[in-house]
Each structure stands twice: as structure tokens, then as C-alpha cells.
Image: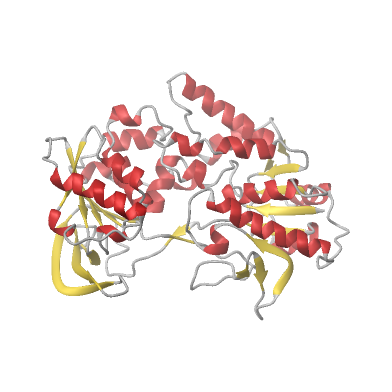
Amino acid sequence: MRVAVVGSGPAGFYAAAALLGADPPVEVDMIERLPTPWGLVRLGVAPDHPKIKSVSRAFERIAEQPGFRFLGDVEVGRDLHHADLVRLYDAVVYSVGAQTDRRMEIPGEDLPGSWAATELVAWYNGHPDYQELDFELERARRVVVVGAGNVALDVVRMLALTPEELGPTDTTDAAIAAICGAGIEEIVMVARRGPAQAAFTTPELAELGELAGADVLVDPAELAGAEPKDTNSERNLEVLRGYAAREPEGKPKRILLRFFRSPVAILGEEQVEGVELVRNELDENERAVPTGERETLDCELVFRSVGYRGVALAEVPFDERSGTIPNDRGRVLGPEGKPLPGVYCAGWIKRGPSGVIGTNKKDATETVELLLEDAAAGRLAAKPEATADAVLDLLAERGATVVMYAGWTAIDEAERGAGEKLGRPRVKLCTWDELRTAAEGASTTPA
């Protein structure tokens, strides 16, 4: 049996592992739009968190197993279509993640200087689609980050790092130069609910207090009466109370953590000049309810970190409301709510953007178990065209150049080699041309 796994992030690799470990083993083609694998492990995890990125070693071991192929620089909807995958594979697993951001739907959201946090994260991590962006960090004195999750904390922390802290990371060279040359004096994180409801985890929160170049400030009044909801919440409150009791040390930057505030408008004529905030109270269900109390916060940049959102694929069912592929435990459901034979999903596009990297293992395994169950029960149609050469022949016919796994290995070695000379984990190649050139000759399938 041959299965296409579309997307090479954690969910895709965990799905591949479950398929390759089946009895009998299943052959897997992992189809990835970029020339590089690993999804948000490469392009979403903060560069100063190398331990989290080390999960990629497990993915490397999966890729070394017999029956695995990586087809990079292949975009579904451009080079291949859903109908092609259904015809050329016994089954398809979509694990394409959540590629865009949720919007706040407030006036001024599209002003220059108002950005999705996902754009900044992709930029400093070297995503080739985002390297032309100019956030104009040099003109910003105050930056507002909207959100209370780990991505919001990543953005706050990355903008506060000193050159010495950024130096040993795999942040792109352009991002290091821009962050170090920024005029930022204050970073304000705005959370719509209280400190007990914040979604960030304690280790990430505690890291802020260890920054060499930034004081962390919390208003004790916003912590008054906060009751922990669980162990993580209890630990967060302990850290926040520690910040509230601290005396500022006079570091170059200040980080303010504000709670019970929601932006109702981003202000400015031609670019961001401020944010209008409303104070919230929590109802009995811990939902944020706006009061009549408002304030204006002057700022030059706003980063919206209110969640990731999935993107629809042509010919594949999609639920606009949830930003996911409609499914029953991983079986993709058609318009009438019945499973589409041989079509599955895993990861964020299946359940929404929640959980940590490891959450995807259980999620992907559940999907694969159903796929194998369907195969054993004869619910997958026979696919006489599902041969190892068929998809490569079709791609060549369409003029596509495929980066195979050896091409990615060549990219990886080039980056690591450049980093080793500088005492960094890697120096990322971050344009399409650089990535394709590094992969050329190693194992690309010519058009």
C-alpha cells in the first residue's frame, strides 16, 4: 500500500512513522510545498529554544526508514491536485497545519505597522515567503503584542533579546541585524482575560525575567483576587507575583504585561499610531466582557497573536468557521457528512491549532489506525496507478523540479557548516533561490 502524507511538520512525520511501522509496512511519500521539512519545528519554534527543535532528530530517524520518500518543493494545487493524489495513492493524509492567523476584526487592523505575529515568526525563522517583509523596527519606540499564549511571549522575548543573546541562535542574519538596530524601548503584551486564564506556559513566562536587556513589569492590582485554575495557572501566578514585587533595574527595555484589556481599534491615518483598549471583566464562565472604561496606548507597531488558522485546499472539504478539514477522528467527511474513502487528515488541520508538538503523535496515530482499519476492511478502492514512479512521472510531465530527501540533507549540511564556523547551530538559507541552489545536484528530480 502507498500513502501520500501532505505536509512535513510533526503531525506528518508522526503519521509517516505509524504507517511505516504497520504490518505489513506502508510506503510513504511525504509531499511538502517547501524544499525543507519539519514545519513549525523549523519555522515556528523560537530560535532561542534549541532544545524544542531537537525533536527533529526523531523525524530524521523516521525519514531513514525503508519505504519513505520526501518530495519537497511540490505544492498541492500547483504541481499536484487532490484528484491526482486520490488516483495515484491508496490513501492521502493531509497534515498541512494552520498556515495563517486569526483576525481581530477591529478598525485599523490593516494599517501599515499592524502585523500578524505569524508573519514576524516566519520572518525571523527564515521562511522563504516572508524574507521581503520590512517591519520597520528601527522607527518603533513602543510595540504592542496582542495575545497571551506562547507565540505572543516568543514575539515579546525575541524583540527584547540583546545581540549577545541572539548571536548563538539560528535567527536569520537579517532579523538579528533588524532586532539589534531597533529603537524599541517598551513592549506591551495585552491579554483580554486575567492572569489565571493566560494560555502561556510557566517556563516561557519565567524566561522573560532572565533577559539581560529588559525589565518585566506587572501591575499588582491586576493580580488581586486571581485564583489558579490548574497547576500551570498556579505556577504562572507565582511568577507574575514575583514580577509585580520586583524593582526595575533600569535595563534598556521594559516589558509590560497587561491583563483584562482588549483592543477595540488600531489608530492612525497612514500607519499605526496607537491602540484603543477597553477594560474587561470576567463573567461566571470566565469570558471577557467589555466595560465602558477605555484607554489609548501610543505605539508604532502592533503584532496580533490571537491564534493560527487553517487554509483551505482546492477540492478538499473545509470548514470556514473552525478553519479545519471536517473529519471524524481523522476520516475526512464529504458534503453529506460521510467519510470520503481514502482521504484523511492529522494535526492542526484536523483538530485546530492546539496542544504542543507531542500532541500530534497521538493525533496522527489515531488517524493512521483508522486508515489501516479501513484498508483491512476493504474500504479503500484498488488503485492500479499507485506505483512509485507514477507521481514522479506526472511531476516531470508538468515541469516540476522535486527536492528529494538528499536535497534537503544538502541544505541542512550547508546551513550547519556555515553555523559551525560562527558557533551557531546553523545559518539558515532563507530564500527560494538559495534553498534550491543548495539542493541542486544532491537529489533533485529534473523537469
Report the front residue among 396 and 181: 181
Seen in the picture, residue 133 relative to 275 is either above or below; the reply is above
Among the 4 quarters of the image, the one containing residue 72: top right
The answer to whether residue 109 is visible is yes
Residue 186 visible? The answer is no
Q: Quadrant of the C terminus?
A: top right
Residue nearer the viewer, 381 or 143: 381
How many numbered markers are drawn? 0
Q: Nearer the viewer, residue 441 or 185?
A: 185
Specify whether 14 is left or right of 187.
right
Q: Which residue is at the far right?
A: 384
Residue 350: percent from left, percent from top: 57, 63
**Residue beneath the point at 16% across and 48% down:** 244
Give x and y (percent) for residue 312.
56, 65
Closer to the camera, 76 or 241?
241
What's the residue at 21%, 42% (across, down)?
184
Q: Is residue 223 above or below residue 126?
A: below
Is 429 positioned to the left or the right of 344 in the image? left
Residue at 83 percent across and 49 percent down: it is: 24
* Residue found at x 56% / y 38%: 56
Q: Position of residue 79 (x, y in %)?
A: 68, 54
User: Is 422 above or below relative to 201?
Assistant: above
Is 40 displayed left or right of 258 in the figure? Answer: right
Residue 45: give x, y in percent of width and height.
45, 43
